[in-house]
Amino acid sequence: MKLKLFLPVLFVAFGALAQTRTNESNLDESKVGTYTLPDPLICADGTRVTSAKIWEKKRRPELVKMFEEEVYGRAPDRLRGMHFAVRSFATNALGGMATRKEITIWFTRGTNGPSMNLLIYTPNASRKPVPAFLGLNFSGNHAVSADSGITLPDRWLPPAKDGSVTNNRATEAGRGKEASRWQLEKILARGYALATVYYGDLEPDFTNGWKLGVRAALSRDGTNTVFKPGDWGAISTWAWGLSRALDYLETDRAIDARHLAVIGHSRLGKAALWAGAHDQRFALVVVNESGEGGAALARRWFGETTALINGHFPHWFDGNFKKYSGHENKMPTDQHEVIALVAPRPVYIASAEDDRWSDPRGEFLGAKGAEPVYQLFSEAGLGVNEWPPVNHPVGDFIGYHVRTGKHDVTDYDWEQYLNFADRHFH
Ligand code: GTR
């Protein structure tokens, strides 16, 4: 009798607890609570990873598969028939400082199928192939620089109040809109190329945006496709596009494709991290304020939660990821392990002090959690145990900073990324 009464009470108590964790974001450090992270060095069968070789042969493939199945979804390989076409070429861009190239990447045979447009600037000061940064942009290639030679995108863009978009299409007013986030002249002056693609070329970023993107175009059932758990979501699609851009860059003689850094901000930071984790051809990975589903630990209750991200952006992750809304402790992985998949290649994680939604400390702890895997390769990771003060970059093969200011990519951030790339590439 007693037991019968007791059980429903217990149930209610758990329900209430689960709800606080699920539906609300927490911004109070004292309420974070405790959690236990999965150990990246313990295999699914319980055995311990004791060498870099075991990591490469057994644990890494196992973790890649877990992230494919449970988090981002599986993307196809590059398709036969993929080909490239030069869309424009100018050797005197930016007052003669750079060569500007626009390349159309057709994912399938012929020119009626899906494609994306890659914009590349290489510094004219260099005679040799140059290392490059590759990243997706939010507002169209023309938004990266005020350079009037960049072709306006003809794809879907989200409405914007600043006149840069009319009827979901780009206008002249959008030129240079994202320039402060790219620091093009600075990158070129430091001897690097910049390559970028508008992420909407791959998939417009709204719930049914996939119908206008490659997920529909490459599926047998097109816009009638019913995605199964484990099939690719939008983040996986954007990451796939980064690998296809790399396929092209490997063929470009102006580029040193063995020294290619993949970079992304926010949701595109999540995509850059997944691309760099998955595709080992990327030599260096830069993840700017990527938050939940990026570098921030999911189990740490601070900022955005799994339930909130799944609720607001149901198209980002694969179907299985929905199971973990409010049940982060049941995840077979956590985000330190996606960072660890970059090892032993250098990775830089960056946070901003006022970007609490992304959980800056959780991003640092994600980076920290990847350290044991770098140590397997005898590489130093962060080299610090405490979250560093603002504007105080730390780390060796894992770089990290939290800068003052809000959610953005700034001149300060680029300064650190260029220094980091210099250190590892030269
Ligand atoms: C927010 C989202 C974050 C982050 C950000 C962005 O709305 O909750 O996960 O990705 O957008 O991409 O700017």
Image (tube, grey):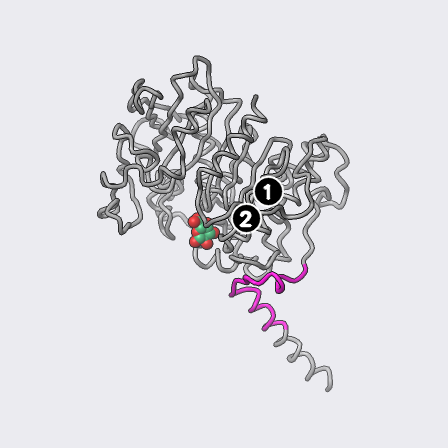
- Label 2: few (<14), some (14–19) or many (≥20) C-alpha neighbours in 10 Å: many
Q: Are marks 1 and 2 in contact (CB under 8 Å)?
A: yes
Q: Which residue is drawn at the image coordinates 52% and 62% (left, top)?
A: 25
Report whether 232 appears left or right of 48. Answer: left
Between 287 and 13, which is closer to the camera in this rendering? 287
Residue span colored magenta: 14-34
Which percent across, then down, holds residue 210? Answer: 37, 46
Which percent across, then down, holds residue 86? Answer: 32, 22
Quadrant in which residue 192 is drawn: top left
Residue most extreme to the top: 127
Q: Which residue is labeled 2 in the image?
A: 71
Residue most extreme to the bottom: 1
Which percent across, then down, holds residue 135? Answer: 44, 35
- Label 1: few (<14), some (14–19) or many (≥20) C-alpha neighbours in 10 Å: many
Q: Which residue is labeled 1 in the image?
A: 338
Between 135 and 54, which is closer to the camera in this rendering? 135
Mark 1 vs mark 2: which is more N-terminal? 2
